[in-house]
Amino acid sequence: MEDPVKYCEENYPETVAEFKKLQEEMYILLCKKQMDYGIENITLGKDISKPQNKTLSLTGIWFRMNDKMQRIINLINNKAYNESIEDSWIDLANYSLISLLISKNKWFK
């Protein structure tokens, strides 16, 4: 079986390079926001090792993601100029990864 990474890197070098660049931007933004807001912003100040608190945290992320999607829809439809749609897409992607980290019990450990 062919290596999927090698396949993509050989056939789609610009896409792969840009994808890696975006991942680095996402990582830097995550770190900056953690410095500004702390992990309690995501955990709602709760101990997420408890199932009910983990659920609450993930529900909070769902609400944030919904807010981002509504903002993206508005940016697409109304061509707003005071906010970058790219920033909203990156935030949405980061919230997805944060949800996975919480689900795997790896959120800032």
Image (spheres, rainbow, N blue to C red):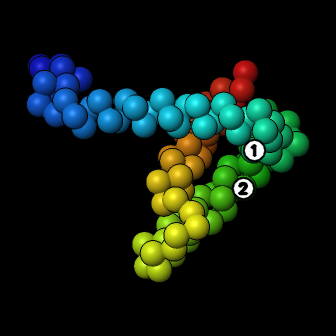
Q: Is residue 60 above or below residue 26?
A: below
The answer to whether residue 14 is left or right of residue 2 is right
Q: At label 2, which amino acid type do we have? A: Gly
Q: Name which residue lies at 47% across and 54% down.
A: 86
Q: Nearer the viewer, residue 76 or 56?
A: 76
**Between marks 2 and 1, how big is the CA–CA gap?**
8 Å
Rendering quarter of residue 22:
top left
Q: Residue at x 19, y 30 (%)?
A: 13
Give neighbour class at mark 1: few <14, some 14-19, many 20+ (Cα, 10 Å). Answer: many
Residue nearest the observer in this picture, 19 or 62? 19
Percent x, y of residue 52: 79, 47
* Position in image of residue 79 (x %, y %): 45, 75
Question: In terms of image quadrants, where is residue 48?
Answer: top right
Residue at 57 percent across and 63 percent down: it is: 83
Per the image, label 1 sits on a secondary structure element best described as helix
Residue of label 1: 42
Mark count: 2
- Secondary structure under tag 2 reads helix
Residue 67 on image: x %, y %:
62, 66
In this view of the protein, can residue 18 be seen by the observer? yes
- Which amino acid type is marked by label 1? Ile
Mark 2, residue position: 60
Q: Residue 103, can we see it?
A: no
The mark that comes first in sequence, 2 or 1, is 1
Q: Are marks 2 and 1 in contact (CB under 8 Å)?
A: yes
Tell me the quadrant of the picture where the N terminus can be found. Answer: top left
